[in-house]
Structures are given as C-alpha cells and as structure tokens.
Image (cartoon, rainbow, N blue to C red):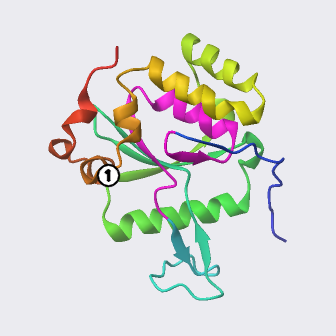
Amino acid sequence: MKNRFQYNKAQPLAGWGYRFDSMTEVKFAISVMEEFAFIRSPVSMYFHPGSFQLTAHPRLFHRRYTPDFLIRHLRTKMAFLVEIKPRAFERNTELDQHRQVATNYIRALKFDWIYKVVYDDEIILNEQQLHDFEECLSLKPEFRYAWFDKYLKRMSSLPPRLMDRSNAHIDFIMRGWESAAPNLFTPIK
C-alpha cells in the first residue's frame, strides 16, 4: 500500500527569479539567504520506480523527482540538496524513495552535496526574519510578490546574489568554485 502524504493547497509565490510552491519554502529561503547561495528546484532526476536507478533517457514508466533547493554555504562551501516537507511527512515511504534517488544522483555525478530533508518545524528564523516573514504572511497572496520586491530593496547586498543567474553563480552553487563568483562573497550589512 502506498503511503502518500496529502498536501493542503499550496500558496505559490513567484519572486526573486524563483517560484516557491509554498510559504514554508519562502520561510526556508529567508532563513538561509544571509549565509547561503541557493538555486530553487536545481535538478530533476528521472528514475525507475522499482529499482530507483537513475536514467538519462526517461520513458513513460519513469518517474521524476525535483528537490526544492540546492544551497551552498558562502564560507564553508558545504552544499546541501534540500527537500522541504511538513513534519507529518517524516515516515512517508515516498520520501525514503526520494532520498535514495537523490543519493544515487549525487554519487553518480560525484558532487560534494549532502541530501537533507528539512521539516517545517526545523526552519528557524531570527527575530528580524520572523518579523519579515509574518508581515508577508499577513498579506493577501496576490500582494506578496510586491512585498518581496520591497524586501529585497531593504537588503541592499542580497539582490545581486539572489538574482544572479550567471554561469559563475551557478558554478559556485553546483561545484563550490569560489573564484568563479567573487560577487557572492560581499558581507551582509
């Protein structure tokens, strides 16, 4: 019997050049943006549902898994392929399958990433981040995008890092090549 978690309807939000599927993903992004560079939905992995083996040539019976974030710490260079889930998803068999697929992917491509599931109750915001997030939550969904524009303007050193779609930015996040993306290492004010 398949153990599938049923989500409540997500409140997607597009901004920062990204599309967030839920406010929990927005909360996570706010929590890491000062110390990590990140890519939203960085890779899609196609796999056989029985063996969880990856395939480069998906067919009709293959499944796709796309983790939520790839983040790399700006100082330590540690990278994490992150899946955001509600705590109720903790013992879900589908999550175990995704963990195996992601681990196979990381190993096959010899990346230095660590796969990590972050549950909603593990996302910790500092006082200012919490205030900002609650302000966003208080708005109607259609006004949240404008809120993010204002939020980014307040955080003057962050937009270039978040909005940067250059190869250097991607190389840093994917492979940790600091020399490729020197603009990522400006201190946060």
- Asked if the stretch drawn in magenta spans residue 158, the answer is no
How many numbered marks, from 0 up? 1
Residue 33: in magenta span: yes
Element marked by disc 1: helix
As displayed, is residue 85 above or below residue 121? Answer: below
Compared across the picture, whether 8 is left or right of 21 comes to right
Q: Residue at x 70, y 45 (%)?
A: 12
Q: Position of residue 166 (x, y in %)?
A: 29, 50
Q: Position of residue 46 (x, y in %)?
A: 54, 75
Left or right of residue 134: residue 37: left
At label 1, the amino acid type is: Ile
Residue at 35% over, 35% down: 161
Q: Is residue 123 visible?
A: no
Q: Is residue 177 left or right of residue 35?
A: left
Where's the C terminus, which quadrant? top left
- Magenta stretch? 16-43
Q: Between 96 and 153, which is closer to the camera in this rendering? A: 153
Residue at mark 1: 170
The residue located at (76%, 46%) in the rendering is 10
